[in-house]
Image (tube, helix red, strand yellow):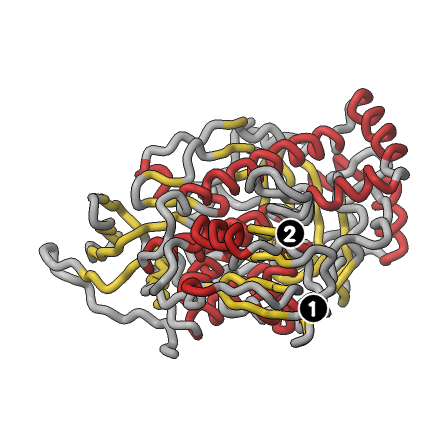
């Protein structure tokens, strides 16, 4: 495998480099994950990252159950676990402090708190190891598409040619703006400051004050990291003097002012490691694809960070898109396969936008919102309600519409025991899989795209399942002719 470092010299105005099947704009978690998924199928990938250096701040994010499952499917989980901290999955919806119900439908029923730069680094290294080429300092300035591909112009004048372009370049996506895709929704109404810094008061005093303030202000947190360092999250209740939005990151004095306004003390904060802020804008791209240009991650959707779903939603977009785009480039994709990317993922994003809207309302200090929060807190004592909300936030409850059939159809398959160890270990190559308990069925002419495991001992309560490369159940049954029809639906025409 090559190192992934792209060192081509700038081209002349009339020269276009044509070495790529897919160019990805943005090497955050979504872009790096997509590059790796494409490389599993030998797609020639270039990732353009406009930043020349990694982010200087260390923000802790949470990988949710579904994302942890995806990492396990590709053999990445052990590396991530070495850098993260597992914590219970309860309390993820609007920070309502309810423990998770027993028997969640996953072998990975926990959250993984991990620094976001570590996630980006590990995924970028994984993509480069698989052969993706990565260019730091490569900013997209423009592009043109035609019936054969996309010509991408970089800020330094270089022009690159690929068959497809995917914008994974964040909420202010240059690709989306140049593509002209509308991004409707609501502008930000609330601002929250977030950073890491030291405090000047004893830990027990911090804990007592945080507990008192959070009785009414759910968007307020001081979490210890050790050695006197705390993660500070505080809502802006005293707007900036000019009344406008921020053009620069907040200063330490902004944190002190808001802490005093919310908690009555600034906790003696000092020596910040990094300072930032975020709003609660909520927007969804009207389309995820225009011709040969696609959008994924925050380029397609933005929403408040409550529930910690943003990074996870982008990773799951990449997992859904990767094998489909690779199939299109490989020449075996059914005509409608790439269209299922938007058909499946946009409704998921709509649901995330709705549940984050609801969670933000439940964080409000208004009497009506507090009354609704108290009522929901009571309802979450019912196992079914608590379970449903956890499955919604952690994306384990997603069911794609594959037509009529058993409840498992269209859902992701949990990691079950099989004769060769565990199911997810069989999905590392990004291929489909037929898990056959009858030992009678075959994948026939699809064996170049779909693996088969005949295992009557597999922990299944159905005869056979056909899994897509993203782990979703595409078919359930025991009839060869019916299986062949579904193999053709998802994996194209057989060979031979």
Given this view, does label 2 or label 1 mark the residue nearer the observer?
A: 1
Q: Which residue in the structure is indicated by mark 2?
A: 195
Which residue is situated farthest in the top direction here?
368
Name the N-terminal-most of marks 2 and 1.
2
In percent of the image, x 50 and y 53: which residue is there? 481
Quadrant of residue 250 within the rendered picture: top right
In the rendered view, would you say 468 is above or below 398? below
Q: Which mark is residue 485?
A: none
In percent of the image, x 20 and y 55: which residue is there? 159
| Helix, strand or loop at mark 1 | loop
Is residue 217 something that shows in the picture? yes
Q: Which residue in the structure is indicated by mark 1?
A: 456
Say which of 392 and 217 sits in front.
392
| Inter-mark Cα distance, 2 to 1 | 53 Å
In the rendered view, would you say 345 is above or below 1? above
- Where does residue 284 sit, x and y in percent of width and height? 50, 34
- Quarter of the image with the N terminus is bottom left
Question: Mark 1 Cα within 10 Å, few/some/many (few <14, many 20+)?
Answer: some
Which residue is situated farthest in the bottom direction here?
1
In percent of the image, x 55 and y 33: which residue is there? 281
Left or right of 108, for residue 379: right
- Where does residue 312 sit, x and y in percent of width and height? 59, 51
- Where does residue 198 sit, x and y in percent of width and height? 72, 58
Does the residue at mark 2 contact the one at mark 1 (Cβ under 8 Å)? Answer: no
Say which of 153 and 449 sits in front.
449
- Where does residue 395 sit, x and y in percent of width and height? 65, 47
Question: Mark 2 Cα within 10 Å, few/some/many (few <14, many 20+)?
Answer: many
In percent of the image, x 63 and y 32: which residue is there? 354
Is residue 53 something that shows in the picture? no
| Helix, strand or loop at mark 2 | strand
């Amino acid at each position: 495998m090559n190192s992934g470092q792209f060192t081509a010299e700038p081209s002349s105005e009339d020269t276009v480099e044509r070495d790529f099947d897919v160019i990805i704009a943005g090497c955050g978690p979504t872009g790096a994950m997509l590059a790796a998924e494409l490389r599993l199928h030998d797609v020639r990938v270039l990732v353009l990252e406009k930043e020349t250096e990694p982010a200087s701040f260390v923000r802790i994010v949470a990988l949710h159950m579904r994302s942890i499952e995806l990492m396990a499917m590709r053999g990445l989980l052990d590396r991530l676990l070495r850098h993260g901290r597992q914590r219970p999955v309860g309390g993820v919806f609007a920070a309502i402090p309810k423990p998770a119900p027993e028997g969640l439908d996953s072998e990975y029923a926990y959250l993984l708190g991990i620094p976001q730069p570590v996630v980006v680094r590990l995924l970028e290294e994984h993509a480069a190891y698989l052969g993706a080429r990565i260019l730091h300092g490569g900013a997209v300035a423009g592009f043109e598409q035609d019936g054969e591909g996309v010509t991408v112009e970089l800020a330094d004048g270089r022009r690159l040619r690929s068959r497809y372009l995917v914008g994974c370049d964040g909420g202010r996506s240059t690709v989306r703006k140049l593509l002209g895709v509308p991004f409707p929704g609501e502008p930000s109404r609330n601002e929250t400051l977030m950073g890491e810094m030291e405090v000047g008061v004893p830990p027990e005093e911090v804990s007592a004050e945080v507990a008192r303030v959070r009785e009414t202000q759910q968007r307020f947190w001081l979490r210890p990291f050790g050695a006197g360092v705390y993660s500070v999250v505080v809502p802006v209740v005293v707007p900036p003097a000019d009344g406008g939005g921020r053009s620069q990151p907040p200063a330490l004095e902004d944190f002190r002012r808001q802490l005093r306004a919310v908690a009555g003390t600034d906790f003696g904060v000092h020596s910040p490691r990094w300072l930032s802020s975020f709003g609660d804008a909520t927007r969804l791209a009207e389309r995820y694809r225009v011709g040969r240009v696609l959008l994924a991650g925050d380029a397609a959707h933005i929403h408040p960070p409550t529930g910690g779903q943003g990074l996870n939603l982008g990773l799951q977009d990449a997992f859904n898109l990767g094998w489909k785009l690779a199939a299109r480039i490989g020449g075996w994709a059914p005509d409608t396969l790439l269209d299922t990317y938007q058909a499946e993922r946009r409704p998921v994003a709509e649901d995330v936008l709705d549940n984050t809207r609801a969670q933000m309302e439940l964080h409000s200090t208004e009497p009506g919102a507090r009354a609704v929060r108290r009522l929901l807190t009571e309802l979450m004592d019912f196992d079914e309600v608590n379970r449903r909300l956890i499955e919604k936030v952690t994306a384990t409850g997603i069911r794609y519409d594959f037509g009529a059939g058993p409840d498992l159809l269209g859902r992701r398959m949990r990691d079950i025991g099989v004769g060769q160890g565990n199911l997810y270990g069989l999905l590392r190559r990004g291929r489909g899989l037929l898990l056959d308990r009858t030992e009678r069925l075959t994948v026939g002419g699809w064996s170049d795209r779909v693996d088969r495991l005949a295992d009557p001992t597999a922990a299944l309560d159905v005869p056979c399942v056909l899994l897509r490369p993203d782990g979703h159940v595409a078919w359930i049954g025991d009839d060869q002719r019916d299986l062949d029809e579904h193999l053709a639906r998802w994996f194209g025409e057989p060979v031979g």
